[in-house]
Amino acid sequence: MTTNLTDRVTGVFLLLFAIWYGYRTTLFKVSFMADPVGPRVFPLGLAILMGVLSLYLIIKPDPSPVWPGSKTWIRIGLITLTFIVYAYLMVPIGFVLSTTFEITALALIFRGPPLKSIIGAFLLSAALYSLFDILLDLSLPTGSVFRGLWG
Amino acid sequence: MEILNFLFEGFAIALTPFNIAMALAGCFIGTAVGMLPGIGPVNGIVVLIPLTFALGLPPESSIIMFAGIYYGSQYGNSISAILLNVPGTSAAVMTAMEGNAMTKKGRAGPALAMSAIASFFGGTVSIVALMLFAPALSKWAIRFGPAEYFALMVFAFSTLSSLSGKNLIKGLLATMMGLMLATVGLDPVSAVDRYTFGQLKLLDGLDFVVVVIGFFAINEILRYAENIHDQEVFTKLGRVMITAKEFAMSFWTMVRGAAIGFFVGVLPGAGGTIASFVAWTTEQRLVDRQGTFGTGDIRGVAAPEAANNASANGAMIPLLTLGVPGSETTAVMLGALLGMNITPGPLFIANNPTVFWGLIASMYVGNVLLLILNLPLVGIFVRILKVPGWFLMPAVVAVSFVAVYSVNNSPFDILLMAAFGIMGYLLYKTEFPLASVILGLVLGPLMENNLRRAMSLSDGDWTYLFSSPIAIGLWIAAIASLFLPLIIKRFGAASEISKEEVN
């Protein structure tokens, strides 16, 4: 019974999503029609097609995939958490420092040796910063907290 | 000879020191990303797109590099296939089976050499075909109006959906997801904002660089978290060369492989994986008298390698002449070209002769460079395979951050990238083909635009979409392509049976 539950759940989710996506088209504030079709028809068509296809998925699901165990989900959660922290840290503390933290954290999650991970992370971050910001002029964040200290 | 004149002008562009350097960079990156399992040409190209924009590189130089990554990856993917039995990209599955069997017999050197030579052969022959067919197809496609384009895109989506995944319905659903993602942002015709939820950052729509990096690079990191591992790398290559006899024996195999690869590559959705499979199966039926295919027959390396390189060049045809790519890599290249205000399509070659002929000439140059990189220098690339996963995977993340951040200089995009990474992982686990989502995302605006232009021309009459012979032909082809999986299943079942008979 549970062997094709994944597709059924996905199908129900996509069906609900399609209904919501289609319903949103009625909320568009269309003041004038620049063309005979307008901005609603294309998304509405997509919603209807997706709805029909997701019904098919609910009726004829594939066997469920092998989902990873809790260890993997914890790792995936940790990795995602580092991304979120990174997004908030990179402007204040700058690219080199935040990326060093990020790579070290990921390397440790992937069972890298601690000291090598930190050294490798720092060298790579510094190399990327030199290459893209200094050499290629791409402007990566220097770090606003250091602004008082130099330049 | 008009073509030769154009080609000379092309070489004048391709042989400038800067463009040679771009081709070399593309070939080098291509070999590396092609070789590393889990990282493919899509990652290599998409990470460099914001960089080429920021540096203001001329379009011909950018496309020379991107194409180099694409065909270079078809060389690189066989290295890990032969040495590790892990195909660098799925196009090297057949090479992995045959080439790794040779490695186990102590013939890794000849396998690598054959793969490089067959790749060169398939690559070079198919550039000639690309050069001859693309201008002709452009002249024909000039008659395409919005109705034909709309039908062509439906055809591309249905073929990709039926060929790229196991389940057609999931392929079509994935296409819908991509098209839906494409509707986020201001509607260009009526300036109505759609699905932005008041987020100013979404008014311009989702940047496809952010979505693609999330889908491919971040998804790959999460997959690595499932199974943290390092590969034992086999480094005793021996002499990387083949004998004249082996070359002569494989010559017609390479010719047929190149021809099959090119035509399969032109088809939307088919690509290198199917090309190499068809080429290998064809050769097995034609030349395998002693039943040595699958046990380390050098022709079994030559066939798929000639085919997957030819298919990469074949896939450039629909991209350049119709503006409708048939694979995830060419879809990403379309996104890059559109970003540089170059619209591939029937007028592309006429309007941008420097870009087209410069690209063609650079592909000849690039294949020679790749032959050098892959024969005497293959030992250097093998060392990249020794970088441990705990460092390589985070390094991919760091490079992705640079690329994503430099799109808009906004950390918000890092969060979006992470969200799309998780979505990509879930789609991968549930077997929704990511290629269909990407193609939908890139082609979505063009598709809606063509639909609305067609309706404006016909004043809202929907039968206009089926009003020309070309359009009707494409609609029929689109519906017919939905039955391809059934035919392939039968073909596959037949080859299973023949295998059992051999055993």
Image: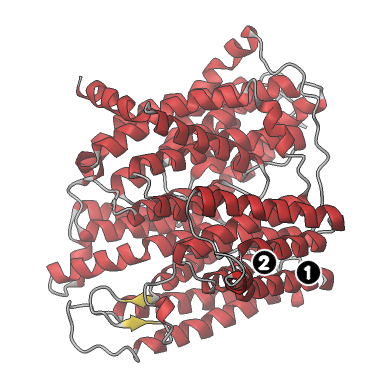
User: Residue B469: x, y in percent?
Assistant: 20, 52
Q: Is residue B341 left or right of residue A146?
A: left
The correct choice, above or below, for B356 with respect to B37 in the image is: above
Disc 1 chain ID: A
Residue A4 seen in this snapshot = no
Quarter of the image where one finds residue B235: top right
Looking at this view, name the residue that lies furthest to the top: B244
Q: Secondary structure at mark 1?
A: helix
Q: Which mark is residue B238?
A: none
Give the colour scheme of this rendering.
secondary structure
Residue B220 in percent (x, y) is at 66, 58
The answer to whether one can see residue B469 in this image is: yes
Q: Residue at x 22, y 64 (%)?
A: B465
As shown in the figure, which amino acid type bears the numbered disc 2?
A: Ser
User: Which residue carries the number 2 mark?
Assistant: A98
Residue A114 vertical placement versus B141 (above, below): below
For label 2, the SS is: helix
Q: Is residue B53 above or below residue A59?
A: above
* Quarter the N terminus of chain B occupies: top left
Q: Residue at (33%, 82%) from the top-left corner? A: B193
